[in-house]
Amino acid sequence: MKVLFFLEPFPVRGQPTDFQWIWERWERLAPELEARDFDCVFACSDAVRALNRATQLRVFAPSDLGLPRERQCADDSQWIALMSEAWHPEWRPFVERLFDATEPDAIVSWTVNRPLQAAAAARNVPILHMELGAVRLPWGNFYYADPAGLNGTSSVPSIWPALRDIPLNPIQERQLDALVNAFVRDRTDLDRSADLRHKLGLSPTKPVIGVFLQLPRDSNILMWSRVPDTAALMTQIQRRFPTHLFQYVIKTHPGDPRPSGLAAFEQWFVAEPVAQHVIDICDAVCTINSSVGVEALAAEKPLYTFGASPYEVLGCTRDAFAEPPGPCAPLSVHEREHGRRLLHFLLQCYFLWEDDVDDPDIFGALLERLVDWRKRKGSLLEWFIERPYGVRLNRIRARKRWIDERHQREHCSLELTAAQSEVATLSARFQATEENAAATAAKSERLEAELMQSREQVSALTRSLPIRLGNVVRRIPALVSIVRRVRRYGRPHRGDDEANTLV
């Protein structure tokens, strides 16, 4: 079987090597697949190929098929056109030439490429659309593996009507509870959330609306958002949830911690790294189509969406555009049941576990099933089979243990850093105290020396005082004689020099 791994050849966001990490993952997988009789061919940008000149893989880039080397273009309009125009004048010819050169039996594509989808449909070649799914850490990274599309073009909305009213059986209920409890209801997480509420100084009397922002140039926003930007998003949220009734917590994206146009809302920004801790303190969650929506479903919070996504389906999400301003109703029984059914489907049937993507046996079997499914013209509902529960639960628990250990290491590291800082501060204070003590001792010694000198001077004066006093007493008769003479004869004679001297 010949498999074409299609890595977007267009320089997304003006960064031709943006998907290098996917190349590295596929490059590790390819030799294992070829050892299992798969013929792997790759398509990528000229920049990615130049970065991997030493590869032994068969690679096609735009310059190999008559297109000029990619232009450095930071304008999103071309990327949007690539995701929406089946007959793109530049990239559809490239895809047609690529098909002629490779003749694939199946395609593994990263992100959405409409010319590729159209050409594959015309030739009846199945595509496995892959991308990071709407379940991320700390659950573990899950991946799309959808023959129809990704994100806003996911299969889920089209097959959901057939799933919505089918209740989970008792085994599935217990399985879902175990999966969710592995993270959402963890006692430590709840304690951290309570600490966060206290740290943010939230009022206990006002409901909290959690707003989760995304990267403004993400394909989810460019293609499937119903608001043009984050400022428009906040305008709609303020209309539905007025500030005199609600308080906000706005979780910014790590890649855009200070989004433009939201200066008036910075008082509500929170940089808490774990989204679940923020969700726990919220009475409702708002997002365009972030992966946090799945976590909100798992936490059983009312979820308002402003863009298309796999979880934006009837009975599971709410439409803020359609609701008038006012109180937010708690989750209804039907919303809770539908949310659990959808969550079970997403975790157990729809998304592919990260380790499955790297396992050549599992991934190879998936590709073989894809080709067979297309030949039989199977339904989308048939494609998404339930995967082994125990393996997923064990992996999630293992991931949870690893994350907890990492958090403990990070916490210990922070405590150690704080202790080291405190020790350094105390050491500096002790050194300053020692220096002050030394200066005080030196000053004390100097004062003591001055005191001793003063004592010696007083002692010498005390010893000399009787002698000086005796001299004065001996000269008193002469003084008396001079005084008498002055009274009798006037001024003293020149011969009275001795008396003058005495006086």
Image (spheres, rainbow, N blue to C red):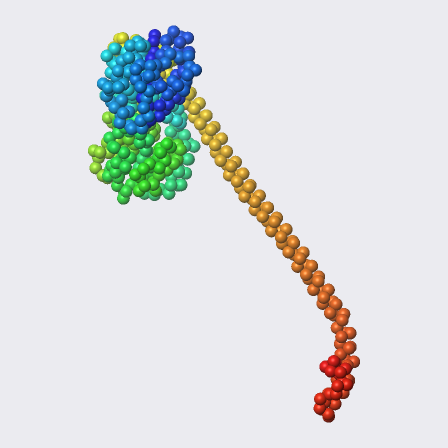
Quarter of the image that includes the C terminus? bottom right
Residue 337 in the figure: left or right of residue 467 = left
Q: Position of residue 355 (x, y in %)?
A: 40, 18
x 48%, y 32%: residue: 410
Residue pushed farthest bottom? Answer: 488
x 34%, y 7%: residue: 1
x 56%, y 45%: residue: 428
Q: Does 107 sit above or below residue 501?
A: above
**Residue 246 visible in the snapshot:** yes
Q: How many marks?
A: 0
**Residue 126 visible in the snapshot:** no
**Looking at this view, is 410 or 65 the one in front?**
65
Q: Position of residue 25 (x, y in %)?
A: 40, 18
Q: Position of residue 90 (x, y in %)?
A: 26, 19
Residue 474 in the figure: left or right of residue 41 = right
Q: Position of residue 271 (x, y in %)?
A: 38, 36
Q: Quadrant of residue 476?
A: bottom right
Q: Does 454 sit above or below residue 120?
A: below
**Looking at this view, is 423 or 55 the one in front?**
55
Q: Quadrant of residue 196?
A: top left
x 49%, y 30%: residue: 409
**Looking at this view, is 95 or 188 the one in front?**
95
Residue 84 in the figure: left or right of residue 447 = left
Residue pushed farthest front? Answer: 494
